[in-house]
Amino acid sequence: MSDQSRLTLNRRSAISGVTTAGALASTLAALGATTPLSLVGPAHAQGSTGVAMGQGNVVFIPGKSVAAVPCAEWEAPAQNAEANGAPLRIVMGKDGVDKAPATASRYESRVYDFPSGSIRTLTFKKGSGPVLHQVAFETEILLLQGSVTLTPLFGVKGPTVKVKAGDALYFPGGMLRNPKPSEDTVMLLFQVPSTAASQKFAHVAGKDLAEVETVQWMQDGKSVTARNAEEVKSAPANAARFKVKRYAFDGNSIRYATLRKGDKTNLGVTSRNDVLIYVPKGRLRRTEGDETFELVAGDAMREKLGNPGYWEVLEDSVFIATDAPVLTAAFAPSMAAAGGTVK
């Protein structure tokens, strides 16, 4: 078995049931031998806190409530016990970042924690230094702005992939780099389980994906959804119309939805898994179960399994969604409610 295969196997086995902070911390420690991640000062892996008692009904996190945590990453010369590797240094918090080398990559991280997974954004400002980020437990990455190259970890065989804005990565491993970025770089990262028995790394180029128009309207008291070209063409003038670009992976996908001002989607029920959604643009009103709230750029939400809900589009908007299967087998019994939901 190659080094890359062994690393990938270890990482996939670990991530399959990781949904809590304790599991994440213990898994990071267990993978220390294969993932050369060195933490200094106040540094620690900023990951999902995951499921906790009383959080089962959390469905909306406004961006203004999420702290922008300054971070820095850099590669340090190998020495002493690390002589056989190239360790990565990570610090979080202003004090640690201020003490990082001038050549370090500096960025802001925001984390949105939901019971069934997490969303994280990384923003690297142009002129603040190079882009460098070691992939940890992100299962899906969508590059919203900028360009990077995915390279293998030191001493590990793996692909080198150029990633452009609009591209997505699935179950990646390695380092995301750009030594001389010409613009801001923004990454959207999802930490969610997969429903597939096994997964393989995928790089999906956004330019290769078609936008599929979806139309919804009510007819004789029933909800109608059309994607077929002829049905879309013949839909009523007042039907809600939105376009979806789908990044398909093993056991999951990312959906990039573009919605137009004034439309209202039909009432629907999330029937298979939770869905985690991030809004990079616009303003929308969401009715989710018995709650109604407005989302603007930088907000995130969870469509909860079993909840009825619909969208009202207040401005031309975009949202980015992925499934977040609730794997109750990984929970403590006190956290799992009937029907595979979370208390």
Image: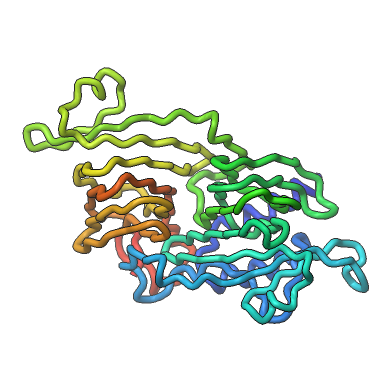
Q: Is residue 217 left or right of residue 279?
A: left
Q: Quadrant of residue 301?
A: bottom left
Q: Residue at x 34, y 46 (%)?
A: 317
The residue sitting at the top extreme is: 230
Above or below, comparing residue 147 to residue 52 in the picture: above
Q: Position of residue 32 (x, y in %)?
A: 74, 67
Coloring applied to the structure: rainbow
Q: Position of residue 215 (x, y in %)?
A: 25, 32
Q: x%, y% of residue 281?
A: 40, 51
Q: Quadrant of residue 66?
A: bottom left
As drawn, is 198 to the left or to the right of 42? left
- Residue under the image location 59 percent in, 69 percent down: 46
In front: 188, or 28? 188
Q: Nearer the viewer, residue 120 or 182?
A: 182
Q: Total of numbered circles in the picture?
A: 0
| Residue at (71, 64) in percent of width and height | 31
Residue 58 at x, y = what percent? 34, 67
Which quadrant, please, contains the C terminus?
bottom left
Q: What residue is rendered at 50% in x and 66% in y?
A: 111
